[in-house]
Amino acid sequence: MNDIGKRIRMVRKSFKMSQSELGDVLGVSFQQIQKYEKGKDRLSCDYLIKISKFFGLPASYFLFGFGWESVEATVKINQIRNIIKKGDETDNVIKSIKKILC
C-alpha cells in the first residue's frame, strides 16, 4: 500500500464510508477504489482532486500527509452535521456534540 492509498483509506474509513460509496462518488467500481488504496493502480490528478473536494481536504494531505488537523476537523464537523440531521432533541444534540469535541 502506498502513502496516498493509505491516506485515502484512512479518510474514507474515518467518514464511515465504504469503498462502494466512494466509488459511486468518483464513478468507478469498489474494485478500483481497492486498487487505489492498495497502490496497485495509480490515482490520476483528476480523481485526487475529486476526492479532495468531496472530503473537503487539501490535496497536499493525500500527497504529502500535510494537514492532518484538517482531516480531524473535517471528520468532527461531518459527525456534528449527521447528529443535527437526525433531528434529536436539543439536549441530546448538545451532549453528542460535546462528546465529539471534548
Image: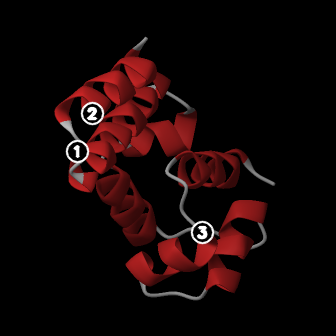
The residue depicted at 35 percent of the width and 65 percent of the height is: 50
| Vertical arrangement, residue 88 with respect to residue 17, above or below | above
- Dot 2 surroundings within 10 Å: few (below 14), some, or many (20 or more)? some
User: Residue 18: which numbered mark, if any?
Assistant: 3
What residue would you read off at disc 1? Answer: 84
3D distance between C-alphas at marks 3 and 2: 26 Å
Q: Which callout, 3 or 1, points at the residue further toward the start of the chain? A: 3
Helix, strand or loop at label 1? It is: helix
Helix, strand or loop at label 3? It is: loop
Image side of residue 42 versus residue 85, left or right: right
| Vertical arrangement, residue 48 with respect to residue 20, above or below | above
Spot occupied by residue 22 in the image (x, y as percentages of width and height): 50, 71
Q: Which callout, 2 or 1, points at the residue further toward the start of the chain? A: 1
What residue would you read off at disc 2? Answer: 93
- Dot 3 surroundings within 10 Å: few (below 14), some, or many (20 or more)? some
The residue depicted at 21 percent of the width and 39 percent of the height is: 89
The residue depicted at 78 percent of the width and 71 percent of the height is: 40
Q: Quadrant of the N terminus?
A: bottom right
Which residue type carries mark 3?
Ser
Task: Determine whether label 3 and label 2 are within 8 Å by CB.
Answer: no
Image side of residue 63 versus residue 94, left or right: right
Q: Quadrant of the C terminus?
A: top left
Task: Determine whether label 2 and label 1 are within 8 Å by CB.
Answer: yes
Image side of residue 1 versus residue 70, left or right: right
Helix, strand or loop at label 2? It is: helix
Spot occupied by residue 42 in the image (x, y as percentages of width and height): 64, 69
Which residue type carries mark 2?
Val
